[in-house]
Amino acid sequence: MQPTPAAASERPPLTHRLRRLMTWFGGSRRWWTIGVVTAMMAALTEPLMPALMKPLLDRGFTQGRLALWMVPAAIVLLFAVRGVAQFVSQYALARIANEGMQRLRRVLFERLLSAEMGLFSRQSASALSNTVVYEVQTGGVLLVQALLSLSRDGFTVIALLLYLLYLNWKLTLVVAVLVPGVSWIMKLLSRRLYRLTRQGQAATDELAYVVEENVLAHRMVRLHGAQDAQAARFERLSHQLNRLAVKSTIASAAMTPLTQLFAAVALSVVVMIALWQSSKQGLSVGGFVAYITAMLMLIAPIRRLADMANPITRGLAALERGLGLIDDTPSETGGRFALARASGGIELRNVRVNYRDDDDARALDGLNLVIRPGEVVALVGPSGSGKTTLVNLLPRFVLPSAGQVLLDGTDVADWQLASLRAQFALVSQDVVMLNDTLAANVALGQAVDRERVQRCVEAANLAPHVAALPQGIDTVLGHNATQLSGGQRQRLAIARALYRDAPVLLLDEATSALDTESERQVQEALQRLMQGRTTVIVAHRLSTIQHADRIIVMDRGHIVEQGSHAQLMAADGLYARLQTHAVGTVQAGADPIL
């Protein structure tokens, strides 16, 4: 879900928003100085062209030698100075902008890595990646172009206006009529552009999310023949984005003809007055041509300045979205307590977890549990009973609404986050691998020790397959290691947990999606992994939990039973009913699923 675009009236002033961006795009004072000075130099050459026209027309045709050598040489020198100045100015501003984009992207990505977990339920992966990569890049490029035009054309307008004032201040007052008219047009249309840009951002996120969903669920979409429905969904959102783009284009394109209309009216009035002055006051041909030339040269930079409303608006909207992610996304916070290695004692005291504000949405409700160091505890129960929520509380992936979660007698809220999470290794049903080498995936977050990686791979029953890979442990696995089978990916996750060597092991449905042979190999690897560690297992399969020291039976956020397999069967409670429900699976020759 994306934040609702702010109304134009709620936006801070443009100058305030630009000043805020200077935090990121302030750059080096040296490069700003070079960029501004060279832009001024390029602008100051503009009025020199009509200034050369006046002596050329008034005296050049009667003083041939002057016109033959001095004026052409001056023109060549003029364009040479202008070209060098524009090049240096463009380079300086581009360098400042690209360094600013790099800084902003780095901070955004670091914020994602440390953001509180709620961010990832509020925004999709495609929306976040779009903000960090595309929006910052687009906004930076647009603002670079706007800065170049503003610096070049802004100084050009000033220089030409000063020259026009020098030639004829009365006529120049007519040109001043352009300023309020153009300003009014830019203010009116820029508000609409900003609103359309924010709506376009939201529509782009929705469209990207549809693509992301269909890429991830491509097998299911094909199996159910849902291609037409998904294509229609994509077309609807694409049409909505197209409508917003057309409206934005209309608002942007309207600036140029309206600005040109104002300029044409002003130019016509100036020509009329200049002709009248020429007849009454004897204005020279050179003076008249120089003034009209400067006037005509003034129109182009004014038009370009008017056109800057579109890239400035779009660029600000894009960059402000990234800044909004920084402002509105708090980082995870932890305490100051730290241990190199915990003993693994876990306690939950009257813990309650609400995923919504109403009490009916409690995932855990007043839960109390003590797990001794080195104990293997299995969590079972119907779907939605709170098993995974309990596991996610331990490394603070989920925060309790009330109560305490303690590790080695210290509330996890008082632990340093890095130290706390270093105490846990996780193997889940949804294995996540990075597009990197196998060794880097096993040693994730730590330096790669090749011998240690090999030992972990062997302990995870994965050595024969790794040996068959083209580059062994240096083989790049690709996107989420999809070239590996489900069992191989699970064993790779176990190798990662072995490499981490944490005192507490979390197993969340680690074997639920495997066939019998794959599960046997994974179970052998898990037995090695659990040795000497506090282990919390969330599982449905009896083979995974029957050897646990204690089985915790949960239902609707409460612990309803606990004990060994034999004790719970003798109690004839919920656990026994779940076992009875699995008898049909046993009779079919498969592992019972609770």
Image (cartoon, rainbow, N blue to C red):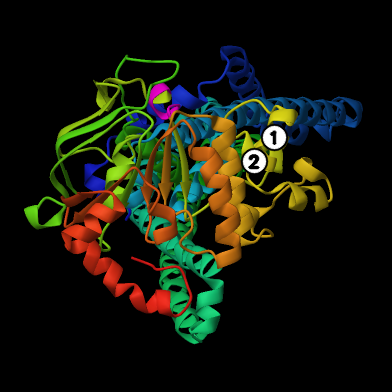
Which secondary structure, mark 1?
helix
Residue 420 highlighted magenta (yes or no): yes
CB-based contact (under 8 Å), mark 1 and mark 2: yes
Which residue is labeled 2 in the image? 459
Residue displayed at 61% across by 41% down = 495
Q: Quadrant of the N terminus?
A: bottom left
- Tell me: 12 left or right of 159: left
Which residue is labeled 1 in the image? 455
Residue displayed at 51% across by 76% down = 220
Residue 525, how many percent across, how many down? 58, 46
Which secondary structure, mark 2?
helix
Residue 310, how many percent across, how many down? 46, 50
What is the distance, in whole Å, between disc 1 and disc 2 at their CAs? 6 Å
Residue 209, how many percent across, how many down? 45, 62
The amino acid at mark 2 is Ala
What is the span of residues highlighted in magenta in the rendered image?
419-423
